[in-house]
Each structure stands twice: as structure tokens, then as C-alpha cells.
Amino acid sequence: TDGNLAVLDGKVNSDDNASFRHADLTAMRDIRQEDETEVKASQHDLNYVTMDGNIGCMVNGAG
């Protein structure tokens, strides 16, 4: 190789709880690229993670 590097794809994940500190990153958010159910949950200050299958967990607490 000639020693050059080419980036073909990139992804950034950030903590939604810190989004108020990074208005520039928040402005780039494209919710069309996110799971619709997870977006709806976040609009109500809920955390929801979509998974395959039919088992659910409802938890409370930080431990």
C-alpha cells in the first residue's frame, strides 16, 4: 500500500443525557435513521431498547 488511509463509513454514538452540552451534535441528529419506537419513547423521557423476540423487562432503579 501507499500508506494512505481511506475512511468509508463512520458512526458516532453519544449519551443523550449529555446532549444539552453538545448542541452542535444534537442539530445533526437524524431521527429517520433511528428506531421509531425508541424515538417515541425518548419523547416521553423513557428509555426503550428494541430487541428480537417476545420477552420484556420493566425495571426501576439504577443498580
Image: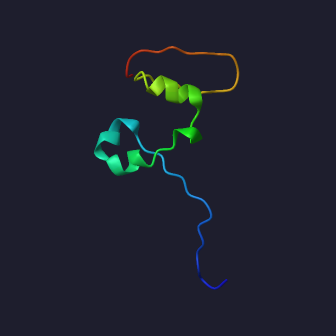
Residue 22 x/y as whole percent? 33, 47
Residue that protrudes farthest toward the left in the picture: 21
Answer with left or right where residue 24 lies relative to residue 5.
Answer: left
Q: Is residue 47 visible?
A: no
Task: Determine which quarter of the picture holds residue 17.
Answer: top left
Identify which residue is drawn at 40% across, 47% down.
27
Identify which residue is drawn at 46% across, 44% down.
29
Q: Nearer the viewer, residue 63 or 59?
A: 59
Q: Is residue 24 visible?
A: yes
Query: Would you place residue 27 above or below residue 43 in this image?
Result: below
Q: Nearer the viewer, residue 53 or 25?
A: 25
Q: Where's the N terminus, which quadrant?
A: bottom right
Q: Where's the C terminus, which quadrant?
A: top left
Identify which residue is drawn at 30% across, 40% down.
20
Residue that protrudes farthest toward the bottom in the picture: 2
Identify which residue is drawn at 56% across, 37% down.
34
Residue that protrudes farthest toward the right in the picture: 53
Residue 19 x/y as whole percent? 35, 41
